[in-house]
Image (cartoon, grey):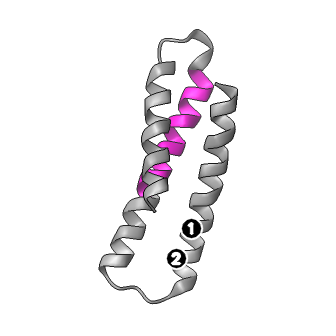
């Protein structure tokens, strides 16, 4: 779960660094969207843990989305 928040922070930092790059517009928006999604996933996971949600399928769905976001982020770093 910490990895989601770390990747979100990294994505936001990279996105901000692209603000002044002429070709960074589309990639910048995608990075910032990905960062926001990862932050929301982190919040949802924390909320579920706090509420002692026992339905593992709900966790697995969020983890799957988080893993996909992390894979996308790793590709985005390569484009940068």
Frontmost residue, 27 versus 74: 74
User: Under tag 1, what secondary structure?
Assistant: helix
Magenta-drawn stretch contains 38: yes
User: Under tag 2, what secondary structure?
Assistant: helix
The spot of residue 54 in percent (x, y) is 44, 89
- 70 vs 48: above or below: above
Number of numbered labels in the structure image: 2
Looking at this rendering, what residue extends furthest in the left direction? 50
Magenta-drawn stretch contains 39: yes
The spot of residue 10 in percent (x, y) is 47, 37
- 9 vs 42: above or below: above
Residue at horizontal 48%, vertical 52%? 38
- Spatial CA span between label 2 and label 1: 6 Å
The spot of residue 47 in percent (x, y) is 34, 72
Residue at horizontal 42%, vertical 60%? 42
Q: Which residue is labeled 2 in the image? A: 59
Q: Which residue is labeled 1 in the image? A: 63
Q: Quadrant of the C terminus?
A: top right
> Does residue 4 appear left or right of residue 67 in this picture?
left
Magenta region:
25-40
Mark 2–mark 1 contact, CB under 8 Å? yes
* Badge 1 density bin: few <14, some 14–19, many ≥20, Cα 10 Å: some
For residue 53, which quarter of the picture? bottom left
> Does residue 16 appear left or right of residue 67 in this picture?
left
Residue at horizontal 49%, vertical 28%? 15
Residue at horizontal 63%, vertical 33%? 77
The spot of residue 36 in percent (x, y) is 45, 46
């Amino acid at each position: 779960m910490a990895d989601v928040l770390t990747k979100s922070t990294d994505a936001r930092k990279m996105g901000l660094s692209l603000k002044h790059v002429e070709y960074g517009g589309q990639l910048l928006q995608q990075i910032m969207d990905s960062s926001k999604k990862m932050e929301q996933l982190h919040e949802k996971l924390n909320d579920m843990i706090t509420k002692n949600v026992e339905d593992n399928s709900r966790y697995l769905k969020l983890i799957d989305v988080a893993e996909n976001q992390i894979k996308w982020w790793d590709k985005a770093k390569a484009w940068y």
